[in-house]
Amino acid sequence: MNKRVLVPLAEGCEELEAVTVIDLLRRAGIEVVVAGLKPGPVKASRGVNLLPDTDLDQALQSPYDLVVLPGGLPGADHLAADRRITDLLRQMNESGRFVGAICAAPKVLARAGLLENRQATAYPGILEAEQHPAITGEAVTEDRKVVTSRGPGTAMDFALALIEILSGTEMRRQVETGLQR
Protein backbone atom coordinates (compact mmCIF):
# COMPACT_ATOMS: atom_id res chain seq x y z
CA MET A 1 0.00 0.00 0.00
CA ASN A 2 1.33 3.41 -0.98
CA LYS A 3 2.29 5.68 1.92
CA ARG A 4 0.58 9.08 2.18
CA VAL A 5 2.22 12.20 3.59
CA LEU A 6 0.74 15.60 4.35
CA VAL A 7 2.96 18.70 4.10
CA PRO A 8 1.07 21.78 5.34
CA LEU A 9 2.39 25.12 4.10
CA ALA A 10 2.01 28.41 5.95
CA GLU A 11 2.93 31.92 4.82
CA GLY A 12 6.61 32.45 5.62
CA CYS A 13 7.60 28.78 5.49
CA GLU A 14 11.17 27.88 4.52
CA GLU A 15 10.94 26.99 0.84
CA LEU A 16 14.14 24.96 0.70
CA GLU A 17 12.84 22.63 3.42
CA ALA A 18 9.33 22.35 1.97
CA VAL A 19 10.41 21.69 -1.62
CA THR A 20 13.22 19.29 -0.65
CA VAL A 21 10.89 17.13 1.45
CA ILE A 22 8.13 17.16 -1.18
CA ASP A 23 10.53 16.42 -4.04
CA LEU A 24 12.48 13.59 -2.41
CA LEU A 25 9.41 11.84 -1.00
CA ARG A 26 7.78 11.93 -4.44
CA ARG A 27 10.98 10.53 -5.99
CA ALA A 28 10.50 7.59 -3.61
CA GLY A 29 6.99 7.00 -4.94
CA ILE A 30 5.33 8.31 -1.78
CA GLU A 31 2.05 10.16 -2.26
CA VAL A 32 2.58 13.70 -0.93
CA VAL A 33 -0.34 16.08 -0.43
CA VAL A 34 0.75 19.69 -0.11
CA ALA A 35 -1.89 21.79 1.65
CA GLY A 36 -1.99 25.51 2.31
CA LEU A 37 -3.50 26.71 5.56
CA LYS A 38 -5.90 28.64 3.33
CA PRO A 39 -6.73 28.37 -0.40
CA GLY A 40 -4.30 29.79 -2.95
CA PRO A 41 -0.54 30.29 -3.30
CA VAL A 42 1.71 30.48 -0.24
CA LYS A 43 4.46 33.13 -0.12
CA ALA A 44 7.48 31.47 1.47
CA SER A 45 10.14 33.16 3.61
CA ARG A 46 12.39 34.15 0.68
CA GLY A 47 9.52 35.41 -1.48
CA VAL A 48 9.02 32.24 -3.52
CA ASN A 49 5.36 31.55 -4.24
CA LEU A 50 4.45 27.90 -3.68
CA LEU A 51 1.25 26.46 -5.10
CA PRO A 52 -0.27 23.81 -2.79
CA ASP A 53 -2.23 20.87 -4.19
CA THR A 54 -5.19 21.79 -1.98
CA ASP A 55 -6.12 23.64 1.19
CA LEU A 56 -5.86 22.16 4.68
CA ASP A 57 -9.61 21.72 5.19
CA GLN A 58 -9.81 19.53 2.05
CA ALA A 59 -6.62 17.66 2.93
CA LEU A 60 -7.90 16.78 6.40
CA GLN A 61 -10.62 14.64 4.83
CA SER A 62 -8.02 11.88 4.24
CA PRO A 63 -5.73 9.84 6.53
CA TYR A 64 -1.92 10.09 6.43
CA ASP A 65 1.01 7.94 7.51
CA LEU A 66 3.14 11.02 8.22
CA VAL A 67 2.66 14.77 8.64
CA VAL A 68 5.77 16.88 7.95
CA LEU A 69 6.06 20.51 9.02
CA PRO A 70 8.53 22.73 7.14
CA GLY A 71 10.19 25.39 9.27
CA GLY A 72 10.94 29.00 8.56
CA LEU A 73 9.61 32.07 10.29
CA PRO A 74 6.94 33.24 10.54
CA GLY A 75 5.73 30.00 8.89
CA ALA A 76 6.28 27.85 11.99
CA ASP A 77 4.46 30.43 14.12
CA HIS A 78 1.47 30.29 11.76
CA LEU A 79 1.44 26.48 12.00
CA ALA A 80 1.64 26.64 15.81
CA ALA A 81 -1.29 29.09 15.93
CA ASP A 82 -3.54 26.90 13.75
CA ARG A 83 -5.74 24.67 15.90
CA ARG A 84 -6.27 22.24 12.98
CA ILE A 85 -2.52 21.56 12.89
CA THR A 86 -2.25 21.09 16.66
CA ASP A 87 -5.24 18.73 16.70
CA LEU A 88 -3.88 16.76 13.74
CA LEU A 89 -0.45 16.36 15.35
CA ARG A 90 -1.99 15.07 18.56
CA GLN A 91 -4.22 12.64 16.64
CA MET A 92 -1.24 11.36 14.65
CA ASN A 93 0.73 10.83 17.87
CA GLU A 94 -2.16 9.14 19.71
CA SER A 95 -2.72 6.74 16.81
CA GLY A 96 0.98 5.80 16.61
CA ARG A 97 1.67 7.49 13.28
CA PHE A 98 4.71 9.57 12.38
CA VAL A 99 5.15 13.33 12.61
CA GLY A 100 8.15 15.29 11.39
CA ALA A 101 9.34 18.87 11.74
CA ILE A 102 12.43 20.76 10.64
CA CYS A 103 14.17 24.03 11.58
CA ALA A 104 11.74 26.22 13.56
CA ALA A 105 8.81 23.78 13.21
CA PRO A 106 9.82 21.47 16.10
CA LYS A 107 8.46 24.23 18.35
CA VAL A 108 5.02 23.41 16.91
CA LEU A 109 5.51 19.83 18.14
CA ALA A 110 6.68 21.12 21.54
CA ARG A 111 3.64 23.36 21.92
CA ALA A 112 1.37 20.43 21.00
CA GLY A 113 3.00 18.39 23.79
CA LEU A 114 4.64 15.89 21.45
CA LEU A 115 8.22 16.45 22.59
CA GLU A 116 7.67 15.65 26.27
CA ASN A 117 10.13 12.90 27.28
CA ARG A 118 11.53 12.75 23.73
CA GLN A 119 14.81 13.78 22.19
CA ALA A 120 14.64 16.28 19.36
CA THR A 121 16.69 18.66 17.29
CA ALA A 122 15.87 22.03 15.71
CA TYR A 123 17.37 25.27 14.51
CA PRO A 124 19.60 26.58 17.34
CA GLY A 125 17.60 28.52 19.93
CA ILE A 126 14.18 27.26 18.86
CA LEU A 127 13.66 24.45 21.36
CA GLU A 128 15.62 26.20 24.10
CA ALA A 129 12.91 28.89 23.99
CA GLU A 130 10.35 26.12 24.58
CA GLN A 131 12.28 24.87 27.65
CA HIS A 132 12.89 21.56 25.94
CA PRO A 133 15.79 19.81 27.72
CA ALA A 134 16.55 16.85 25.40
CA ILE A 135 18.08 18.64 22.38
CA THR A 136 20.49 16.42 20.45
CA GLY A 137 21.95 18.95 18.01
CA GLU A 138 22.11 16.17 15.40
CA ALA A 139 21.12 16.67 11.76
CA VAL A 140 18.13 14.35 12.23
CA THR A 141 16.69 12.87 15.43
CA GLU A 142 13.98 10.19 15.54
CA ASP A 143 12.39 9.30 18.87
CA ARG A 144 9.28 7.13 18.97
CA LYS A 145 7.77 8.25 15.67
CA VAL A 146 8.68 11.92 16.08
CA VAL A 147 11.35 12.97 13.56
CA THR A 148 13.05 16.35 13.78
CA SER A 149 15.83 18.11 11.89
CA ARG A 150 17.97 21.25 12.29
CA GLY A 151 17.39 23.44 9.25
CA PRO A 152 17.76 24.13 5.53
CA GLY A 153 21.23 22.54 5.42
CA THR A 154 19.87 19.25 6.79
CA ALA A 155 16.70 19.15 4.66
CA MET A 156 18.07 16.44 2.35
CA ASP A 157 19.18 14.27 5.30
CA PHE A 158 15.74 14.78 6.85
CA ALA A 159 13.87 13.81 3.68
CA LEU A 160 16.07 10.74 3.17
CA ALA A 161 15.47 9.65 6.78
CA LEU A 162 11.70 10.00 6.20
CA ILE A 163 11.97 7.88 3.05
CA GLU A 164 13.83 5.19 4.99
CA ILE A 165 11.19 5.22 7.74
CA LEU A 166 8.28 4.96 5.30
CA SER A 167 9.74 2.87 2.47
CA GLY A 168 12.89 1.17 3.75
CA THR A 169 16.64 1.36 3.39
CA GLU A 170 16.71 0.20 -0.22
CA MET A 171 14.37 2.96 -1.40
CA ARG A 172 16.43 5.53 0.50
CA ARG A 173 19.55 4.19 -1.21
CA GLN A 174 17.92 4.38 -4.65
CA VAL A 175 16.78 7.97 -4.16
CA GLU A 176 20.12 9.04 -2.67
CA THR A 177 22.09 7.40 -5.49
CA GLY A 178 20.01 9.27 -8.06
CA LEU A 179 20.79 12.56 -6.33
CA GLN A 180 24.57 12.08 -6.79
CA ARG A 181 25.39 13.27 -3.26
Image (spheres, grey):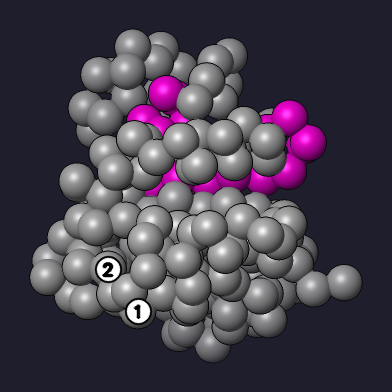
Whether residue 58 sits left or right of residue 12 in the image: it is right
Say which residue label 2 marks: 42
Measured from the top left, where is residue 97 in percent x and y? 73, 43
Q: At x 80% / y 73%, what residue is drawn?
A: 2
Place of residue 5 in the rendered image (x, y in percent of width and height, measured from the top left): 62, 63
- Magenta stretch containing residue 99, yes or no? yes
In the foreground, 109 or 122: 109
In the rendered image, the vertical position of residue 75 relative to residue 8, given as above or below: above
Check disc 2 and report its element: helix, strand or loop: strand
Q: Which residue does the image show at 21% across and 65% down from the upper left?
A: 44
Instruction: Evaluate whether residue 131 shows in this view.
Output: yes
Please provide percent x and percent y for residue 65.
Answer: 72, 55
Residue 109 is one of the magenta-drawn residues: yes
Q: Amino acid at mark 2?
A: Val
Residue type beneath disc 1: Leu
Q: Which quadrant is the N terminus positioned in?
A: bottom right
Which image quadrant: the C terminus? bottom left
Q: Relative to 143, is 17 above or below?
A: below
In which quadrant of the rendered view does residue 156 lie? bottom left
The numbered disc on residue 165 is none
Mark 1 Cα shell of 10 Å, populated few (<14), some (14-19), many (≥20): some
Neighbour tally class for label 2: few under 14, some 14-19, many 20 plus, Cα within 10 Å: many
Instruction: Decide which of 63, 173 is in the foreground and name it.
Output: 63
Residue beneath disc 1: 51
Residue furthest to the right in view is: 1
Point out residue 117 in the picture as x, y percentages from the top left corner: 58, 14
User: Range of the magenta residues?
Assistant: 93-111
Q: Are marks 2 and 1 in contact (CB under 8 Å)?
A: yes
